[in-house]
Amino acid sequence: MPKVGRFVTDPRAGAYCQITLDSGDKIVVHHEKGGFKGGLLTVEVTRMMGLRSERIFACHLDSPQGVAALARLTRDAERGSIAATPLAAFVAYVKDTGSLDALRVRCAALMSGVES
């Protein structure tokens, strides 16, 4: 069962949430704008006790693909709720993937417009 950490907001760096996948891998979902529309949303795998990371996904939410992906993720969320923010919507989308390989596939499907 995945473990979703708390949502942390930093006015200068944006917002992020750490997730431990079923495989034991730790990822950080980061939104540079701190939970509002637009900006860059990334997923990084933390390595070496959190001192290094590897970016495995990035989405510019202002791009046509990013706008479409965010619309798919938030279509059932109540307008103005936390679930309607890019960070919360993406955390909900990836938290149950189980492994890094499954996460990569799921992210690629989201960006290509394929429902998963």
Image (cartoon, rainbow, N blue to C red):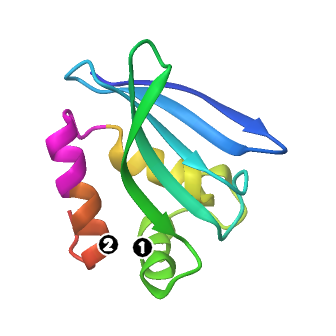
Q: Is residue 101 magenta?
A: yes
Image spot of residue 4 (x, y percent) = 46, 27
Which disc number belongs to residue 48?
A: none
In percent of the image, x 21 and y 75: which residue is there?
Answer: 114
Give the dominant element type of the magenta stretch: helix, strand or loop. Answer: helix
Q: Quadrant of the N terminus?
A: top left
| Residue 107 falls in image quadrant | bottom left
**Label 1's element?**
helix
Q: Hey, which residue is sitting farthest bottom in the picture?
A: 64
Q: In the picture shown, does residue 86 fall above or below 114?
A: above
- The amino acid at mark 2 is Met
Which disc number belongs to residue 111?
A: 2
Q: Is residue 28 left or right of residue 100?
A: right
Q: Quadrant of the C terminus?
A: bottom left
Q: Is residue 49 left or right of residue 13?
A: left
Range of residues picked out in magenta: 96-105
Cα distance in 3D space between marks 1 and 2: 6 Å
10 Å neighbourhood of mark 2: few (<14), some, or many (≥20)? some
- The amino acid at mark 1 is Ala
Q: In the picture shown, does residue 84 fall above or below 31?
A: below
Q: Is residue 13 left or right of residue 94?
A: right
In percent of the image, x 16 and y 45: which residue is there?
Answer: 102
**Label 2's element?**
helix
In percent of the image, x 28 and y 38: which residue is there?
Answer: 96
Q: Hey, which residue is sitting farthest top in the picture?
A: 49
Q: Are marks 1 and 2 in contact (CB under 8 Å)?
A: yes
Image spot of residue 18 (x, y percent) = 50, 29
In percent of the image, x 69 and y 54: which residue is there?
Answer: 35
Q: Which residue is mark 1?
A: 69
The residue nearer to you, when weighing 80 against 49, is 49
